[in-house]
Amino acid sequence: MQYAVAEALRGDRSHQTAFRAALKERATMTADRLNTIPGISCVAPVAGFYAMPKIALPPGRTDEEYVLALLRATGVLCVYGSGFGMPPGDGFMRIVFLASPDELRDVYQLIEDFTRDYLYA
């Protein structure tokens, strides 16, 4: 593996510009789309390939309850923010946005439909 790392560092990096542009597009799309969902707010990520949106949970509910209910209802898998040290009642979750923009659009629609029912039904 040590030899592979050296070659990776010396090798062609021309793909990186396109890859960073694709990640930026997905990051912007993620924040913009999640911010249109009532009950969810999201700061646009500036590095990495994930976002940490906040869900305005009802009192007494936890991020883990929301994420598990989302998974059961839609098949969409996110990670609850308390797994990264956030307080469970604050309602954060981590979303990885490496999928294609078309797939992300579908996922965000599922999240919107689920969240409307979860928070307002």
Image: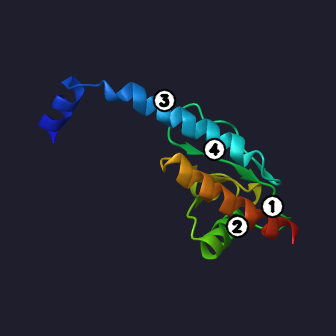
Measured in 3D between alpha carbons, the distance from the residue under mark 1 to the one under mark 2, in whole angstroms, is 8 Å
Furthest residue in direction front, as rendered: 102
Tag 2: amino acid? Tyr
Given contact means CB atoms under 8 Å apart, are the residues at marks 4 and 2 in contact?
no
47 or 89: which is nearer to us?
Answer: 47
Q: Which residue is mark 1?
A: 57
Residue 30 tag number: 4
Q: Which residue is mark 3?
A: 21
User: Crowding near pointer 2: few (<14 within 10 Å), some, many (20+)?
Assistant: many
Q: Which image quadrant: the N terminus?
A: top left
Measured in 3D between alpha carbons, the distance from the residue under mark 3 to the one under mark 1, in whole angstroms, is 33 Å
Q: Secondary structure at mark 3?
A: helix
Tag 4: amino acid? Thr
Q: Is residue 32 above or below residue 104?
A: above
Q: Earlier in the sequence, mark 3 or mark 2?
A: 3
Q: Earlier in the sequence, mark 4 or mark 2?
A: 4
Q: Position of residue 51 (x, y in %)?
A: 60, 44
Q: Earlier in the sequence, mark 3 or mark 4?
A: 3
Tag 1: amino acid? Leu
